[in-house]
Image (cartoon, helix red, strand yellow):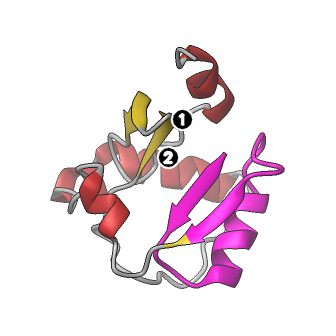
C-alpha cells in the first residue's frame, strides 16, 4: 500500500505510524499535488473542513487525550484512499470531510483483483 502526501516527510511518517493497520505502507511525496488532482481531490468546502462533524470528532479526540499539533500545509486539501491495480482504480474512498479515515484493509479487500 502506498500513501501519497504533500507535506513534511517526517511528519507524514509519524502520522502514518499512529494509524492502526498501516504498518508496512510506503510514503510517496507529492508536493505539487499532481496525484491528488489526477484522482479528483480538490479543496474541501467550509463544511468539510470545519463543519459540525469535524468539531464533534475533534472534541471526542481531545477528550480522549489527543492533542493536535500546529496545522501545516493546505488545510483545505481533501484526501482520499484509492486501490490501483494494473493502472486502474479498483476501489475508491474520497474523504467526506477532514476527519474521515477509511478502513484501509477493508478498502483493499473490497477491490477486485
Seen at 39% across and 54% down, the residue is 79
Percent x, y for residue 12?
64, 72
Seen at 46% across and 49% down, the residue is 99
**Quadrant (top left, top right, bottom left, bottom right) of the C terminus:** top right
Q: Is residue 86 magenta?
A: no
**Quadrant (top left, top right, bottom left, bottom right) of the N terminus:** top right
In this view, 96 is above or below 78 = above
Using a 10 Å C-alpha cutoff, classify the residue at mark 1 as few (fewer than 14 neighbours), some (14 to 19) or many (20 or more): some
The extreme left residue here reads 45
Mark 1 secondary-structure assignment: loop
Mark 2 secondary-structure assignment: helix
Q: Earlier in the sequence, mark 1 or mark 2?
A: 2
Q: Which residue is mark 2?
A: 57
Could you say which disc has been placed on residue 14 in the image? none
Seen at 37% across and 43% down, the residue is 95
Percent x, y for residue 66?
69, 62
Q: Which residues are magenta?
A: 1-28
Percent x, y for residue 55?
40, 53
In this view, 105 is above or below 101 = above
Q: Which residue is mark 1?
A: 102
For this rendering, which residue is in front, 89 or 25? 89
Q: Is residue 38 left or right of residue 29?
A: left
For this rendering, which residue is in front, 101 or 2? 2
For this rendering, which residue is in front, 6 or 18? 6
Seen at 39% across and 50% down, the residue is 54
* Residue 15 visible to the viewer: yes
Percent x, y for residue 16?
70, 60
Amino acid at each position: 500500500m502506498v500513501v501519497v502526501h504533500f507535506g513534511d516527510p517526517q511528519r507524514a511518517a509519524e502520522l502514518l505510524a499512529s494509524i492502526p493497520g498501516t504498518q508496512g505502507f510506503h510514503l510517496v511525496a507529492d508536493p505539487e499535488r499532481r496525484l491528488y488532482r489526477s484522482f479528483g481531490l480538490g479543496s474541501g468546502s467550509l463544511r468539510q473542513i470545519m463543519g459540525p462533524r469535524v468539531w464533534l470528532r475533534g472534541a471526542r479526540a481531545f477528550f480522549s487525550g489527543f492533542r493536535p499539533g500546529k496545522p501545516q500545509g493546505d488545510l483545505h486539501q481533501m484526501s482520499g484512499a484509492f486501490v490501483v491495480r494494473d493502472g486502474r482504480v479498483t476501489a475508491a474512498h474520497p474523504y467526506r470531510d477532514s476527519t474521515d479515515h477509511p478502513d484501509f484493509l477493508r478498502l483493499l479487500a473490497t477491490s477486485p483483483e
